[in-house]
Image (cartoon, grey):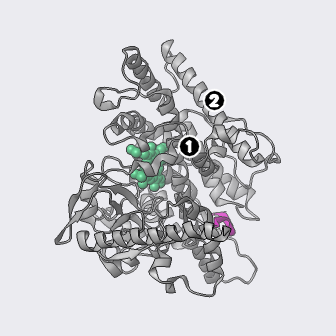
Amino acid sequence: MILSLILGPVLAYMIWSLICLEKNVRVARRVIGVPVIRSPIDGNNIPYQVFSPFFWMLLDLLPIKWSSYPDFIRFWRGGWHVREKADPHVRLGPVWALVTPACIELQFADPDAIMEIYARRRDFVRPIKQYRLLEVYGPCISTAGWDDWPRHRKVLAAPFSENIMKFVWDESLRQARSLRRSWFVNAAEAGVPSVQKDVRALSLNVLASTGFRKSYDFHGSADAKPKSDENVEVTGYRETLQTVLDNCIPLMLIPYRVLTGPFMPKGLAKVGRAGAKFRDYMVQMLEEEKAALKEGRPGVGGIMTAFVHSLIVHEKEMAQGMDPKAISVDGKKGLSQEEIFSNMFVINFAGHDTTANTLAFCMLQMAANPKVQEWLGGEINRVISADENEEEEWDYKTVFPKLKRCTAVLYETLRLYPAVVALPKWTEKKAQTLKVGGRTLTVPAGVYTMAACMAIQQHPQFWGDDAETWRPERWIVRNEMGEEELYVPREGTFFPWSDGPQNCPGKKFAEVEAVAFLACLFRKHRVEAKKTHEGESEEAVRNRVLACVNDVNMDMLVRMNDPDRVRVVCKEVTV
Ligand code: HEM
């Protein structure tokens, strides 16, 4: 009796899911007219998200090659983009549909269609319900509807102008110099315990300093530090932010106020307290900045100043009796305190691990490719003269634009390992037509249109037969005067920072930071992977590093499963 009470609804749910799945398949085939891959369960289904890791763990134990599973298993598993890369498009063409019982997702690897989706921003809109998790502290830029989004974007993008790039450059060099010292001196024998942790520390310090004028010295995984105790409460701004970002998934799923409530396991309660503490810090920073501006003092600058200006506008709007829920189409321009806090979280979330993971991928690829290090070192030493030994002397305006090979290394890394595998938009309430190749597709309302970033960036049609190989030299071409220039790929074939108006405002920030980091590290130093045993051949070491850097998953962002299984050693060279 109890069994049938449980099994009955489960069976009914399964039959209902199958009916919905087949209904969606019919729409994809007959209305849109594209090839279909079925996935029996929608990836956003919560019970699926809880139980699926165990299921996949069991499946991984079987001695069966992943590529030999049928499509409906392969594409059912989250993170399939990083495993399949361009293959589904090579097999099925520039557009195909991943169909689940809950939705139809059109996957595009057609440059013109992708650019059209980005350009027609009112027809193909950001599916904000998928971004609601980011509302840890309230409404933010990522969850603002199209009409209201410019109000957030105006405030957020302004401080990322060219004016702060010198600051990003100088701070990145300062941090990179300490990282280099840590790797070269303290990790000389045993190797760097965690490249990933170190580049995360560097990226967080640059962000905290540039964005929020909170300056910290670099502390690497090889540097001596006080014994940490899991039970010790985090208190400083940096540690609090680090705890918040390290635990952003529980914080996104469970409000921090609930996490700090009674009966919570110790670990989660600590995360909740960090969430609350980070809000206190934001209140304090905002109050201090407000006071400074009111007293006619200059304020700290950076994004805090922009936020305070927007808060002052908001307070005036409220004093005029404006509806706090009104959106910018009704004339509202300021940001409320909650919106500011939420956007501060988003900037930290969007700007930290994206950059840090990219640098980690970069480092391991460099360790596997000593010739690229020489090639890079050649450029750095040509651009920076032999007597400019102090990084403080490296002028952003004259040096940064000349470091084309450093930029090439960054672009090539983002080509193979973009932080976000596919950028979602959807038709929401209205059907749209869209040209793909020689055809015009009718895309019904409520259908997702994914710009398949990872697929098109590794598609042999656009990147050649070695599309899956990390080869930064592909980004360098020569102009008529024989000078090196950056290759400009066809529009819609390279967009790790997304494209169109809702692209990443931190693009230049990330470029300046990465180039400064590479220039500082590879001017007089080289990295190599530490051998696991005396007789390990160079080829075996290289294969081990490549296996590590290509063992990737999609856990909010693209990242390596276990980057610390390779230890890197940093050596000085004579140039
Ligand atoms: C290599 C580094 C980075 C990569 C690959 C990257 C990538 C992206 C992508 C793909 C988006 C669009 C997301 C979407 O539409 O779903 C985005 C948005 C965003 N990024 Fe970045 N990002 C990087 C660094 C940064 C940095 C350093 C900052 C700030 C300091 C930043 C701030 C933002 C913000 C605020 C948004 C939301 C923009 C909006 O909704 O209008 N990003 N980023």
Tell me: residue 340, above or below residue 243: above
Q: In the drawing, does residue 268 fall left or right of residue 205?
A: right
In the image, residue 399 sits, relative to residue 546, either above or below, namely above
Viewer-nearest of labels 2 and 1?
A: 2
Labelled pair 2, 1 in contact (Cβ < 8 Å): no
Question: Which percent across, then down, holds residue 186?
Answer: 74, 56
Q: Quadrant of residue 450?
A: bottom left
* Distance between mark 2 and mark 1 Cα atoms: 22 Å
Determine whether, in the image, residue 146 is placed left or right of residue 77.
left
Amino acid, disc 2: Asp
Q: Residue at x 31, y 46 (%)?
A: 501
Residue furthest top as drawn: 295
Q: Which badge, 2 or 1, is on the more N-terminal residue?
A: 1
Q: Quadrant of residue 567?
A: bottom right
Write down the region rendered in magenta.
562-573
Amino acid at circle 1 = Val
Residue 323 point in image, percent of width and height: 37, 23
Q: Secondary structure at mark 1?
A: helix
Marker disc for residue 280? 2
Q: Is residue 309 above or below residue 384?
A: above
**Mark 1 close to ligand 1, CB under 8 Å:** no
What residue is pinned by disc 1? 206
Would residue 570 be counted in the magenta stretch?
A: yes
Taking depth in this image into account, of 12 and 179 the one nearest to the observer is 12
- Residue 100 is tagged as none
Residue 79 visible in this rendered orientation of the protein: no
Secondary structure found at label 2: helix
Please state which of residues 430 and 226 is positioned toward the viewer in this rendering.
Answer: 430
The percent position of residue 1, horizontal first and vertical second, equals 66, 69
Where is residue 202? Give x, y as percent: 60, 48
Q: From what the image shows, is residue 11 above or below residue 324?
A: below
